[in-house]
Image (cartoon, helix red, strand yellow):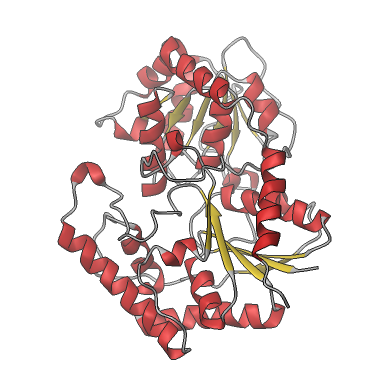
Amino acid sequence: MAHFYLCWELGGGLGHAGRLKSIAQPLRARGHTVTLVLRDLVLTRSLLKDLDIATLQAPVWLHRTAGLPPDQASLAEILLACGYLDAEALAGLCAGWRGLFRQGRPDLIIADYAPTAILAARSLGLPTAALGPGFSMPPADAPLPPLRGWEAPPTARLQATESRLLASANSVLAAHGATPLAHAAELLLGEHPLLCTWPELDHYGRSGGGPWLGPNLPQAAGGRAHWPAGEGARVFAYLRHSIPESTEALQALVRRGCRVLCYMPEVAAGARKPVDSPLLAYAPAPVALPEALAQCEMVVSHAGEALVAQALLAGRPLLMLPHAAESFLMARRVEQLGAGINAMGRPRPRNWDALVANVLEEPGWRAAAAAFARRYADFNPARQLEDLADRFEAMLRPR
């Protein structure tokens, strides 16, 4: 039997941990050893508490990087801000990953937005696979694409950041006698890239290529959906306390008379409720999404890929409050699909009451979401997980 290291380094939210949990389970069922290496061990605790799996803290960048543009134009600029601007700093992060891998001696590194895990594995000659949605799985054999294509960042800027990123990474690899990278995308794709999305939800708008494996969705888990009493529309919200627009959206939902079930991780961990109303119930732990989505009429979220995919598979329209490049690109794709509104793309001051009313009352949003659900009605997440396990086993090298 093999030892798999499942690694998450960058990005927030529970989607990464949920994805790794879902792929860990079939590997464990086949008798393999699995170790989770996670960016966040606190907010993920309730999600992972039913797993009897060793869990380690991922080496992550803890410092502020000065001198970079405020609006990141590509994944290269995101990585530069996370330790890749300076080769010596990156060497320190890589040393942390190398230490974990030497200690655990994994047979395969599976990375979910974990470029330094892939870098460290390459420096040690360990095989790597990468999986995730389009954002962290950019096109191969090409410079990293712009994230703000609607603003057309200068080509020279994209080339300069890509070159700086490659210089840092290849400096680390050279110190260990490892083969250099030709493209920065290799840091995110590893040796075996697995694109877990569909063309409609691809952040970069690719239509060809693939294979398109469909979103990797967490298995049904979590607490029951308990809605506030009343007659208003049921709305499921997954929002972050630190995003100011979360409060504005919740206030608009309450004014509308909606019955809102909100999972806000910070409130579940003891933070103050941003809005207090008998129409608003805060879930004390992650909610069982199939039940909540089957019962609600609308979803409000920060446009995380996993929740967006599940909402659309349930035929539910979305009001989205993206707060990072990844979620903003996803919200744009959903809006182009006609299945939801990207509130953050609306001019200020935003009329939250009108946005809520539009998603609830305009039938086109629900019709587009329902069409998406019909198109992928045969998608079977459990079957996909077994297929992924087959693929991972085929990647193992003979001992």
What residue sits 69% from the left and 72% below the top?
A: 107
Front residue (pair 369, 244):
369
Q: In x, y percent, where is residue 171?
A: 37, 84
Instruction: Pick whichever, 4 or 390, lies toward us.
Output: 390
Q: Measuring 49% from the left and 47% from the top, which residue is drawn there?
A: 133
Q: Residue at x 48, y 16 (%)?
A: 366
Q: In the displayed structure, does residue 64 sit left or right of residue 18?
A: left
Total residue callouts: 0
Instruction: Give the x, y percent position of residue 242.
Output: 46, 47
As drawn, 327 above or below 81:
above
Q: Measuring from the top left, give residue 49's x and y in whole percent.
A: 76, 53
Please say if 286 is above or below 190: above
Q: Quadrant of the N terminus?
A: bottom right
Along the viewing direction, whichever of 76 and 108 lies nearer the viewer: 108
Is residue 285 visible from the viewing direction of this image? no
Considering only vertical position in the picture, is 195 above or below 293? below
Residue 153 picture location, percent across and down = 19, 52
Res. 374 visible in picture: yes
Residue 67 position (above or below residue 261): below
Looking at the picture, tell me which residue is in the foreground, 284 or 341: 341
Name the image quarter holding residue 383. Answer: top right
Judge from the rendering whether residue 217 lies leftward or rightward of residue 357; answer left or right.
right
Looking at the rendering, in which quadrant would you find the C terminus?
bottom right
Position of residue 338 in the picture relative to residue 10 (left or right): left
- What residue sits 37% from the left and 42% below the top? 206
